[in-house]
Image: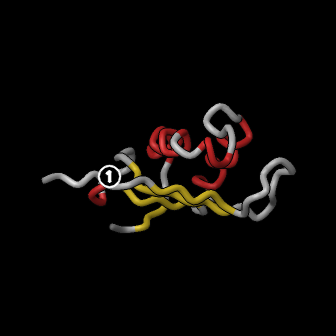
């Protein structure tokens, strides 16, 4: 597993991953501020992800994190860290 810079091709998978943890952090997928912050961080190379099987951009994500230097008032975390369990195939 490699931690790599996220690209705009990863955006859809980021949002799918975020939807799995909204019960912990609140609404993100439908929050324009979250999406805008994610896009900004991807464009500034401050968003990172782990793709399943070290896949190409757009592959299923196992985890992701981004860092913000200036925090919007309604976001209390320095970054979002998401993690998804890998499915083990027998």
- Taking the image as shown, residue 62 lies to the left or right of residue 69, namely left
Q: Quadrant of residue 76?
A: bottom right
Residue located 42% across and 53% down the image:
84
- Taking the image as shown, residue 88 lies to the left or right of residue 38, namely left
Q: Nearer the viewer, residue 81 or 48?
A: 81
Q: Nearer the viewer, residue 7 or 35?
A: 35
Residue located 61% across and 42% down the image:
22
Q: Position of residue 35 (x, y in %)?
A: 65, 40
As drawn, which residue projects farthest toward the left? 90
Q: How many marks?
A: 1
Q: Is residue 84 above or below residue 31?
A: below
Q: Quadrant of the N terminus?
A: bottom left
**Colouring rule applied to residues:** secondary structure
As drawn, which residue projects farthest toward the bottom? 2
Q: Position of residue 83 (x, y in %)?
A: 47, 57
Q: Nearer the viewer, residue 28 or 71?
A: 28
Q: Nearer the viewer, residue 47 or 79?
A: 79
As drawn, which residue projects farthest toward the right? 73
Q: Quadrant of residue 28?
A: top right
Q: Position of residue 14 (x, y in %)?
A: 50, 45
Give neighbour class at mark 1: few <14, some 14-19, many 20+ (Cα, 10 Å).
few
Q: Is residue 82 above or below residue 36?
A: below
Residue located 67% across and 37% down the image:
27
User: Label 1: which residue?
Assistant: 56
């Amino acid at each position: 597993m490699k931690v790599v810079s996220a690209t705009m091709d990863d955006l859809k998978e980021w949002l799918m991953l975020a939807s799995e943890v909204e019960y912990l952090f609140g609404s993100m997928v439908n929050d324009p501020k979250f999406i805008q912050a994610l896009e900004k961080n991807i464009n500034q190379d401050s968003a990172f992800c782990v793709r399943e099987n070290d896949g190409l951009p757009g592959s299923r994500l196992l985890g992701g994190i981004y860092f913000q230097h200036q925090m919007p008032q309604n976001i209390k975390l320095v970054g979002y860290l998401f993690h998804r369990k890998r499915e083990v195939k027998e």
